[in-house]
């Protein structure tokens, strides 16, 4: 996406910028209820204690965050 925004034509740059402005916040907002549902499902099915916030961090992180800890 960054490559297309930086190198693309003016028309494609505008399209990619508007696409990113819409999809990235939408994904972050939708990821929270989905991570709650996934954590609840894992806990109910397997009995494993999974934190909703840890699952959320994994879903919204562009790279595995544990590499940097």
Image (cartoon, rainbow, N blue to C red):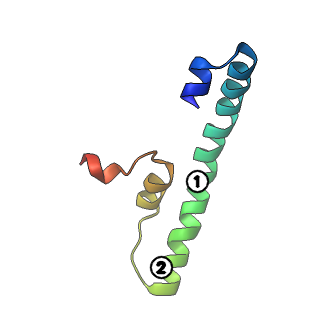
Disc ID at residue 43: 2
- Left or right of residue 55, residue 38 in this image: right
Corner quadrant of residue 17: top right
Q: Residue at x 64, y 51 (%)?
A: 30
> For the residue carrying disc 1, how many other residues have a C-alpha within 10 Å: few (<14), some (14-19), or many (20+)?
some
Residue ID at (71%, 13%): 10
What is the x, y in percent for residue 14?
72, 20
SS at mark 1? helix
Locate residue 65, reporting x and y percent.
35, 49
Where's residue 32, x and y in %?
A: 56, 54
Label 2 vs 1, first from the N-terminus: 1
Residue with the most extreme top position: 10
Q: Residue at 50% of width from left, 77% of height from top?
A: 42
Q: Quadrant of the N terminus?
A: top right
Spatial CA span between label 2 and label 1: 18 Å
Residue 8 appears in which quarter of the rendering? top right
The residue singled out by tag 1 in the image is 31
**Toward the viewer: 21 or 37?**
21
Q: Nearer the viewer, residue 43 or 63?
A: 63
Residue at x 70% of width, y 32% of height: 19
């Amino acid at each position: 996406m960054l490559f297309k925004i930086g190198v693309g034509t003016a028309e494609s740059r505008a399209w990619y910028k508007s696409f990113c402005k819409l999809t990235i916040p939408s994904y972050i907002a939708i990821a929270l209820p989905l991570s709650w549902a996934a954590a609840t499902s894992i806990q109910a099915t397997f009995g494993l204690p999974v934190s909703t916030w840890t699952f959320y961090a994994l879903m919204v992180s562009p790279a595995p965050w544990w590499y940097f800890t």
